[in-house]
Amino acid sequence: MNTVTKLFLAVVALGCLSFPAQAQDVKAAVEKYNSAFRSKDVATIKTLLADDVLLYEHSVRNVGLADVFENHLKPEIIEFEDLKAEFTDVRITAGKEMALITRQYKIQGKMRGKEITAAGNETMVWKKVGKEWKLAHIHYSHPCPRPATQPQ
């Protein structure tokens, strides 16, 4: 069983339990992540990632801290200009050592001089590492272009 499957099963199992203190701690970690993202504070972003973090975005798959940070998050965050990020419908299911966060996102800004607006769904799995909450998994999904309909 791979790490993502284990994380998912653990979060589902813990979803039946209520851990309000952990939910507040996870919420604070997510807000720290959001603030660092908006201010392009990539050093803080890196401290919030677990060593074995896994990121999925459509066909992109980044595995481990170096890959996720250096080849995905850092370059994208640095390239954004005039970044605005909005997160809505945030739902937190927290266990003692793992938490599931789902939310919708809308990002606007410029990248390489081109206006960008991206919106979609995001799933995050956070895990307790020592006394800190670390981001273990991120999955972005956004609308895929649909092929034009063919006349019959």
Image (cartoon, rainbow, N blue to C red):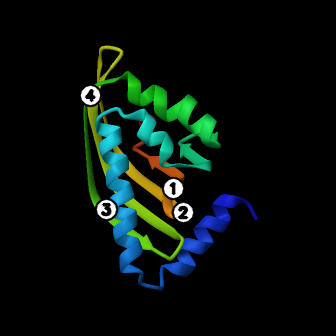
Name which of mark 1 and mark 3 comes first in the sequence. Answer: 3
Name the residue carrying label 4. Answer: 109
Query: Badge 1, how many Cα within 10 Å: few under 14, some, many 20+?
Result: many
Name which of mark 2 and mark 4 comes first in the sequence. Answer: 4
Name the residue carrying label 3. Answer: 90
Work out whether 99 lies above or below 63.
Answer: below
Secondary element type, mark 3? strand
Cα distance between the residues tagged 2 and 4:
30 Å
In the image, residue 13 lies at what x, y percent?
56, 80
Secondary element type, mark 1? strand
The three-letter amino acid code for the residue at tag 2 is Lys
The three-letter amino acid code for the residue at tag 3 is Val
Q: Are marks 2 and 1 in contact (CB under 8 Å)?
A: yes
Cα distance between the residues tagged 3 and 2:
18 Å
> In the depicted view, which residue is nearer to us: 104 or 78?
78
Name which of mark 3 and mark 2 comes first in the sequence. Answer: 3
Q: Which mark is residue 134?
A: 1
Number of numbered discs visible in the structure rendering: 4
Q: Are marks 4 and 1 in contact (CB under 8 Å)?
A: no
In the image, residue 39 lies at what x, y percent?
29, 35
| Residue that extends furthest to the front in the rendered view of this protein | 131
The three-letter amino acid code for the residue at tag 1 is Lys
Mark 4 vs mark 1: in front: 1
What residue is drawn where x is 62% and y is 35%? 67
What residue is drawn where x is 26% and y is 28%? 109
